[in-house]
Image: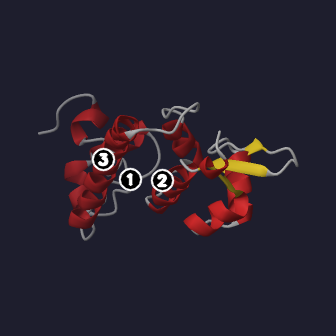
Amino acid sequence: MKRSDVLSIGQLSSRTGVAVSAIRYYETQSLIASVRNSGGQRRFLRADIRRLSFIMIAQQFGFSLERIADLLGKLPQGRTPNKADWSRISKIFKTELDERIATLSKLRDNLDGCIGCGCLSLEKCKLYNPDDRAGIKGKGPRYLMGDSPETTSGTEQK
């Protein structure tokens, strides 16, 4: 590995805007990996600039570090990820973002009406959620979480 292929933790921090302490934390969470030079100092591959950028973007979209680690685990560790590698991970990421966008759109469009919580506090709930059928699937706004009246009752609603 050439000296120009690696960055110190300070250089990586400077290039990405990620604090040194955060880089160390991401390393402990196996989101990135370093090698040690003869003096024991961390050295990171230039490819880690992209990995850290992906981490920052994914966190802004609300992805957990566990999910980010899972997605990054699909990238090769022994070499710099290429365009095909990033395309594969991007496809998964885009699908999950599309699902979140659909959920948020549904929330926005239904915010002034029943939000599918099963509270039975509105007359409308008697039509969409008789006898709190949404509650069978669990807590929270079941219809916004992807359940529908058809899936919560086991039979199609009229």
The answer to whether residue 143 is visible is: no
Query: Which is closer to the viewer, label 3 or label 2?
Result: 2
State whether residue 57 is above or below residue 137: below
State whether residue 140 is above or below residue 115: above
Question: What residue is shown with label 1?
Answer: 141
Q: Give the quarter of the image for residue 34.
A: top right
In this view, the residue in front, 55 or 1, is 1
Q: Are marks 3 and 2 in contact (CB under 8 Å)?
A: no
Question: What residue is shown with label 3?
Answer: 99
Picture residue at 34% right of the left edge, 35% below the top: 84
Query: Which is closer to the viewer, label 3 or label 1?
Result: 3
Picture residue at 27% right of the left edge, 67% below the top: 111
Q: Which mark is residue 54?
A: 2
Q: Secondary structure at mark 1?
A: loop
Q: Report the Cα–Cα distance between label 3 and label 2.
A: 19 Å
**What colouring does the structure picture have?**
secondary structure
Query: Which is closer to the viewer, label 1 or label 2?
Result: 2
The answer to whether residue 142 is visible is: yes
**Dot 3 amino acid type:** Glu
Q: Which quarter of the image is occupied by the N terminus? A: top right
Q: Is residue 10 left or right of residue 135?
A: right
Q: Position of residue 120 (x, y in %)?
A: 33, 56
Picture residue at 27% right of the left edge, 34% below the top: 151
Q: Secondary structure at mark 3?
A: helix
